[in-house]
């Protein structure tokens, strides 16, 4: 009898194991393919289980989206681990997403690296629906021309300090090269420090200014926190896990942040310190205002003022949101603007015919040291950049190197797009980086040719209005666009009043790019600066 029981158990055990494995297998398949199911009709390459198309992203970088658009057309699927994205790479479809169907697609999807960090999450970028529109309406006046014009003297002071630093570096190194992208990141961060926090970070160091200190430490932490926001498997373990199995991200982060020297531990410590520092600055400013200091016009002070206007605004702009909104300037406004300035100067340095026209325009403005007003920036520099009416160098530089090659959105309800029905919750991303390389809109896309934006040029007249959208499109487009362009234009006018730049022989060609949350130059931009003869301008 006992023997019969044992034989029965022996036969039963493998059978139960097989059934359990099948159940787990089916569960696993359902789990990994559930998000795919709703968008399965959209074309795309076969996706690896768990990893999706992350290996393709690792191999080709952001160029992968151009390759996929060539193969699958203007709307295709890309799997970021388990999460499918529907990528839109056609100007008219981008207009649909950003403008015409905005009511159904008003928010951004939350990428794995951001989940769990209130400092990153509670700014304008990731807030949703009514809170987003209330917050945007409250702060929008800070980005209007009248407010921005008042920032010109502050920007100019930072730019002049950067130019002095370039001159000092050139003299010290006997015309050796220097890393322009490092300098422009410091410059952009100093400007944001003044405009957003009302604090001089003093990152650009000249022999006269001395430098660094506490503020520099703060920004080093910011840079570390930003570069940790990676979108691929080189990210901290919890983020990588979040890409393949989102429910495990939170528990993994809570566990790993306690394990010293893991990437999660380092990011958590950095974020905590950063958070504490931003909160300190906010609290100090609130006290200062209580003490009746003179009115300050930096972003933080204006937002704190707005809080006092009504109970509703106090509820909207909680201390967490004020910190996040202020910090967001560093996140959204420093690396992007710095990259744009670096790529414009790098491209001009390799194109003498463009440089000659630019120098003629800068010299024609007035004697060296003349500082343009906001109106001058609008009207007197058509070759550099003049809203939509001219042949701008900056526009073409932003097309050539698109700093945000992807723009993340998510559907709030079912939408019809490009012949496909996409369910609520679909991650729908626009691809300005692909649009910028499309030969149908930009013939010979690999050529740097500012004239292609000349209003008189046939190429431009034929082009779709949404073919070039480096700042996004529609009500959710970049709120800091004017701020960024004012800064880049002002910088270029002053820098070309004083210098011409050459590419260093130590600089690789073409420059290697890397893709974190935005694009950056992997090995910097090494340039040689020659001071211009005083008699020229
Ligand atoms: C050349 C520099 C910059 C580029 C290329 C850039 C690009 C972008 C892009 C592509 C978006 C997404 C737009 C969309 O979804 O349609 C965006 C959003 C945003 N940008 Fe910028 N940006 C730049 C500079 C700045 C600056 C200087 C600031 C702040 C001072 C800023 C603050 C923001 C904010 C807060 C958002 C979110 C807007 C919202 O969701 O309502 N950006 N930016």
Image: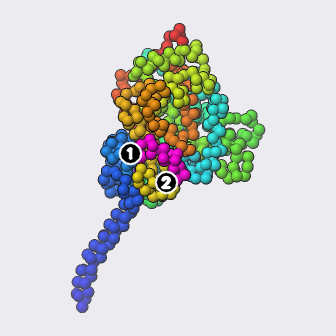
Task: Classify the position of the C terminus by image quarter.
Answer: top right
* The label number, if any, that marks residue 74 in the structure image: 1
If you read the primary sequence from the N terminus, does the residue marked by circle 2 or circle 1 appear first?
1
> What's the coloring here?
rainbow
Where residue 113 is drawn, which disc sits there?
none
Q: Quadrant of the N terminus?
A: bottom left
Q: Is residue 395 magenta?
A: no
Q: Residues within 10 Å of mark 1 (few under 14, many from 20)?
A: many
Check disc 2 and report its element: helix, strand or loop: loop
Q: Does residue 315 appear in this view?
A: yes
Image mark for residue 411: 2
Q: For the magenta stretch, what is the residue range?
A: 86-107
Q: Residue at x 36, y 56 (%)?
A: 41
Residue 75 picture location, percent across and down: 39, 48
Q: Quadrant of residue 74?
A: top left
The residue under the point 57% across, 29% down is 486
Residue at the image point whose x is 68% and y is 40% from the top: 302
Could you tell whether 369 is left or right of 9 in the image?
A: right
Closer to the camera in the image, 250 or 399: 399
**Residue 203 visible from this viewpoint:** no
Residue 354 on image: x %, y %: 44, 20
- Work out whether 536 lies above or below 324: above
Q: Position of residue 381 (x, y in %)?
A: 54, 22
Report the residue that reaches farthest toward the right. Answer: 292
Q: Is 17 above or below relative to 262?
A: below
Q: In this rendering, which labeled residue sits more in front, label 2 or label 1?
A: 1
The part of the image, by quadrant, that contains residue 20 is: bottom left
């Amino acid at each position: 009898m006992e023997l019969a029981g044992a034989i029965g158990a022996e036969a039963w055990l493998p059978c139960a194991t097989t059934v359990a494995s099948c159940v787990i297998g089916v569960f696993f398949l359902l789990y990994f393919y559930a998000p795919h199911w709703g968008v399965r009709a959209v074309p795309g390459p076969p996706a690896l289980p768990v990893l999706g198309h992350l290996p393709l992203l690792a191999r080709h970088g952001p160029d992968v989206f151009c390759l996929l658009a060539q193969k699958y057309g203007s709307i295709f699927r890309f799997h970021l681990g388990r999460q499918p994205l529907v990528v839109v790479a056609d100007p008219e479809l981008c207009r649909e997403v950003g403008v015409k169907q905005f009511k159904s697609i008003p928010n951004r999807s939350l990428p794995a690296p951001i989940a769990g960090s209130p400092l990153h999450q509670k700014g304008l970028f990731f807030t949703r629906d009514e809170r987003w529109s209330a917050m945007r309406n409250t702060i929008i006046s800070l980005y209007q021309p009248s407010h921005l014009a008042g920032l010109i003297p502050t920007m100019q002071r930072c730019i002049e300090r950067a130019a002095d630093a370039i001159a000092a570096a050139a003299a010290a190194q006997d015309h050796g090269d220097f890393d322009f992208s490092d300098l422009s990141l410091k410059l952009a961060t100093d400007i944001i420090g003044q405009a957003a926090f009302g604090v001089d970070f003093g990152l650009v160091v000249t022999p006269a200014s001395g430098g660094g200190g506490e503020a520099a430490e703060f920004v080093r932490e910011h840079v570390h926190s930003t570069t940790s926001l990676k979108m691929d498997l080189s990210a901290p373990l919890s983020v990588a896990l979040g890409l393949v199995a989102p429910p495990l991200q939170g528990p993994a982060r809570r566990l790993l942040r306690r394990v010293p020297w893991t990437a999660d531990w380092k990011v958590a410590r950095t974020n905590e310190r950063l958070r504490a520092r931003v909160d300190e600055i906010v609290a100090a400013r609130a006290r200062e205002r209580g003490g009746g200091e003179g009115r300050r016009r930096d972003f933080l002070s204006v937002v704190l003022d707005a809080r006092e206007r009504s109970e509703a605004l106090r509820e909207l702009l909680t201390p967490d949101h004020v910190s996040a909104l202020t910090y967001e300037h560093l996140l959204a406004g420093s690396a992007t603007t710095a990259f744009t300035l670096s790529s414009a100067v790098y491209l001009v340095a390799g194109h003498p015919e463009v440089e000659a026209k630019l120098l003629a325009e800068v010299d024609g403005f007035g004697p060296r040291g003349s500082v343009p007003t906001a109106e001058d920036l609008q009207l007197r520099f058509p070759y550099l950049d003049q809203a939509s009416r001219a042949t701008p160098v900056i526009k073409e530089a932003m097309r050539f190197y698109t700093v945000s090659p992807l723009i993340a959105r998510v559907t709030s309800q079912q939408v019809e797009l490009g012949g496909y029905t996409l369910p609520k919750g679909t991650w729908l991303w626009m691809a300005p980086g692909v649009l910028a390389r499309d030969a149908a809109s930009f013939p010979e896309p690999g050529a740097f040719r500012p004239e292609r934006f000349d209003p008189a040029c046939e190429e431009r007249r034929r082009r779709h209005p949404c073919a070039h959208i480096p700042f996004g499109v529609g009500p959710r487009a970049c709120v800091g666009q004017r701020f960024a362009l004012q800064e880049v234009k002002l910088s270029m006018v002053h820098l070309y009043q004083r210098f011409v730049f050459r590419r260093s022989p130590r600089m690789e060609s073409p420059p290697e790019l890397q893709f974190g949350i935005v694009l950056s130059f992997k090995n910097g931009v090494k340039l040689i600066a020659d001071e211009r003869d005083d008699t020229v301008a």
